[in-house]
Image: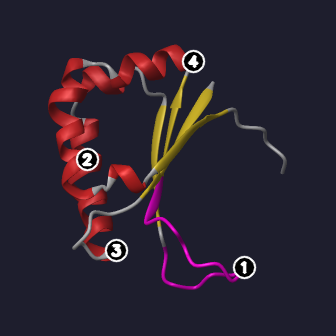
Amino acid sequence: MIKYIICATRKAGMTREEFSAYWRHHHGPLVKSVPEFTRHVRKYVQCHIVGDAVPLGTAAAYDGVAELWFDSPEDLVKAFNEPRYLEVIRPDELKFVDLHQCISFITEEVSVV
C-alpha cells in the first residue's frame, strides 16, 4: 500500500475559508461520484488547516493536504489517467487549486506509535 500526498495551495483571490469550503463541500463529493477514478483509490482524506496557530512557530505554507491510498504506484497512475478523472475531476481542481504552487509525493507509511 502506498500513499500519495498532495500539499495544496489555493488559487489567487480565494480566502483559505473559501478554498476549504469548496474542497470539502464540492470537490470531495465530486471525486466520490466518479467510480472510474475511485475504484483505484483505497482511501481519500482531506486535511484542512485549523486556525492560524502554529505550535512550532512556522506558518503554514499550504492550505491543506490531500492523502490518497493506493495498492501500488501502478494503480495511482491508472487512477490519474482515467478518462473520467481527466474529464470531470481535473477541471474542477483547476477551479480552486494553484497547481504550480502545490507539491506532491508518493510515500510508504511506517507506523511509529
Q: Earlier in the sequence, mark 2 or mark 3?
A: 3
Q: Nearer the viewer, mark 1 or mark 4?
A: 1
Q: Which residue is mark 2?
A: 93
- The span picked out in magenta is 50-65
Q: CA distance from mark 1 to mark 4?
A: 34 Å
Between the residue at mark 2 and the residue at mark 3, the CA separation in whole angstroms equals 15 Å
Residue type at the position of mark 2: Glu
x, y percent for residue 70: 52, 25
Residue wearing tag 1: 56
State the residue at coordinates (78%, 38%). 110
Residue found 51% across the figure and 14% down from its top: 74
Task: Give the crowd class for mark 1: few <14, some 14-19, many >=20 residues within 10 Å.
Answer: few
Q: CA distance from mark 3 to mark 1?
A: 20 Å
Give the quarter of the image for residue 22.
bottom left
**What is the number of the mark on residue 39?**
none
> Is residue 21 in view?
yes
Image mark for residue 16: 3
Tag 4: amino acid: Ser
- Look at the picture and state if 79 lies above or below 10: above
Residue 72 bears which disc, if any? 4
For marks 2 and 1 on the same chain, the one whose residue lies earlier in the sequence: 1
Picture residue at 58% right of the left edge, 85% below the top: 53
